[in-house]
Image (cartoon, grey):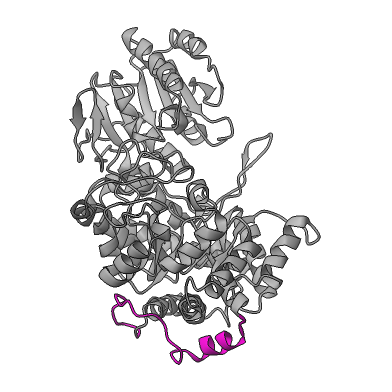
Amino acid sequence: MRRIAFAATIAIAAIAGCSPGATGRVASAPVPGQDRWVDSVMATLTLREKAAQIVWPNLYGDYTPHDSPQWRRLSSYIKDQKVGGFLMSVGSPIEIAAKLNAMQEMSTVPLLVGADLEAGAGYRVRGGYFIPNGIDLGSSTIFPPQMALGATGDTALAFQMGRITALEGRALGIHIAFAPVLDVNNNPANPVINTRSYGENPAMVARLGSAFIRGVQANGMLATGKHFPGHGDTETNSHLEIPVVGVSRSRLDSVELVPFRAAISSDVSGIMSFHGDMPALDSSGVPGTLSHKVMTDLLRTDLHFGGMIISDAMDMAGVLKQFGADEAVKRAVAAGIDILIQPVDVGKTIDAVVAGVREGRYSEARLDQSVRRVLQLKRTLDLEHNKIVNIDALRTIVGDSSHVAVAREIAERSITLVKDSLGELPLKLSANPRVLSITIARRADLSAGAAFNGELRTALPGLHTEFLSSDDAAPDYARLERLTDSADVTIVGVYATQTIDATASTKTSQVFAGFLERLTSNHKRPIVVSFSDPYLLRQIPWVPAYVVAWGGFPPSQLAAARAILGRIPVVGKLPISIPVAGRVIERGSGIARPVTSK
C-alpha cells in the first residue's frame, strides 16, 4: 500500500498547485506545463468533452446485464457523453468492483469515482438482505455515525476510521470519500445533519475531522470536507428547500468555519458545497453552491483553498425550484465549482456548461482550471496505469476482521447513558426475567433490532420481541401496552427518525410520546434506546432511562445490547447538549457504568 499512499500525498499537493511535501494551502489554479500527461489529454479534448470531465452522474452498484437499458445508459455516459467520473451510490462489494472495472475499461480517459463514505465503505457498499428469508448478504466495514466518534472524543479512533475507509474504498475502485461531514450540529431540530456531525463544539469537530482526513489521505484515498460553509444550524431540509442560516459573519468565523479552516490546514483534497443561503456572506439570496462570494472569494481567496470544490447533488429540489437545472449549472461553474455531481440530466448538464462559456458567463480558461484539477487527480493517483482493481484481493481487505474490530471499539466506547433515574442499568438479571424488546422502525429497515435482540437473547433466552412499523398511519401502540403487563422489563429501541424529527407530523410525534408517557405513569419503567436521533429525549423527558447508541448499524446495536447487559463499561459522553423540559443536559454529560456481567 505504500505506493498508493505516496500517490495520494502527491495528489493532494498537485491539486493545490504545489510540490509534494509542501503545504496544500495555496489558492493558485493548475496551469499548463505542470504535467505532461494532463497537457496531452487537454490537447485532445473538445470544449464539450472538457465540460463532460466535470459532470459526474449517480451510479448504482446493482447487477446490470450488458443489454439492459441501465447498462446501455451507463455505456452512453462513458462512450458518448465522455463524463469524467461518477458518484457511486449503493451496491455489494464484488458487484461494485466488477462494475467499476468494466466502466474503466470502456473509458478512454480514466474515470474518477467518489462516494459518500461517511460511516466507512459499508455506508454505501453492502450486500443487503435476501427477501423473504432476511439473510444478511455481507458488507464492507460499517462504522457508527460520526457523532459516535464525538461521544468517544478520540482522534486516534477517527484516524483509524479514515484509514480503514481508504483501504477498503480504494480496493473497491473508489478514489474519493465525500467525507467527513464538518458541519457543527448546533441546532437540535436539524433534519439533515444530526448524527452525521461529530457534535456541536467547533474545536472538537475540527480535531476529529482533521484526524479522519489524515487517516484517509495517508492511505491512498482523497477526503472531502462538507458542507461548506456549514450546514449545522438549520431546520430546513436542503433536499427540499433552500435553508437560510441567518447568523452574523463573526458567528460563522467562530463556529461554522472553524472545522473547514482546520481541514484546509490538514491539506484536505476536496470541499463540498452547501445548498444554503447565508446572508452574512452573500446578501443576494443565492445558495452557497451558486455564489462566487462564497465559493471563490471566501473559500479560494480568504481561506486559501487550492483543492477540488465539489457541488452537493445538483438534483436537489431547493436549488432546482429557485433556478432550474440549466441556470443552476451555469451559476455553479461561474461561482467556482469544479465538479457537478448527480445532475438531473447528464447530456443537458454538459450542454449547459458549454453554453455558459459561449454566453460569456465564464471563460473557457475558467473551465480549463476545473478540468485540469480533475485530470491532475487522475494522473497523480496513477489511474492511467492502474485504473483496474484486483477483485481476487477484495476478501483480504474489505470487511477484514481487524477493521470490524475498530468499528466495534468505536461503537462500544460511544454508548452514552444520559438518564437512569431508577438505577435500572445495567440490567439486574434475576432467574428467567421477562424482558420485552420493542423495535420501532420503518418496515423496509430489515436490520433494525436484529443484532440488538440477537445479543440480548444470548443472556435472555426468553426474550420477547415486537416490531412496530413507523410507516403505519395508525400504529397499534395499545397492543404493545397490553404486552408490557406481562414484562418485568420493557426496552424500546427507536430507529425511525421520522417518528420524532422535524419532518414528522405533530400527531405522529404526540402518539409516540403518549405511548411512552403512559408506560412511565403506569410504572412500567421503560428503557429507551435511541438508534436514530439523540435529541429524542426532548419529546419524552419523563422516561426514567435513556441510552443513546448514535446509529442503527450492527456495531452500534451490538454495543447497546452489551452495555444494557453490563458486558461492557458505559463511558460515552454527549458531544451535544440536549434541551429537555426547561433545562439543558450539557455537552460532556454521561453516566458511567462498570462491567457487571460476562
Q: Is residue 128 visible?
A: yes
**Position of 566 relative to 347 (above/below):** above
Q: Nearer the viewer, residue 446 or 323?
A: 323
Where residue 223 appears, as percent x and y from the top left, is 41, 65
The residue at the point 50 percent across, 74 percent down is 360
- Return the x and y of residue 483 as percentages of the image width and height: 48, 11
Q: Quadrant location of residue 162?
A: bottom left
Would residue 26 be counted in the magenta stretch?
yes
> Going 37% across and 51% down the picture, which residue do you hit?
285
Residue lying at 41% horizontally and 14% vertically, measured from the top left = 515
Stretch of the chain drawn in magenta: 19-46
The answer to which image quadrant residue 234 occupies is top left
Residue 59 lies in quadrant: bottom right
Would residue 531 be found to the left or right of residue 443 on screen?
left
In the rendered view, tell whether residue 524 sits above or below residue 272. above
- Say if 387 sits above or below 502 in the image: below
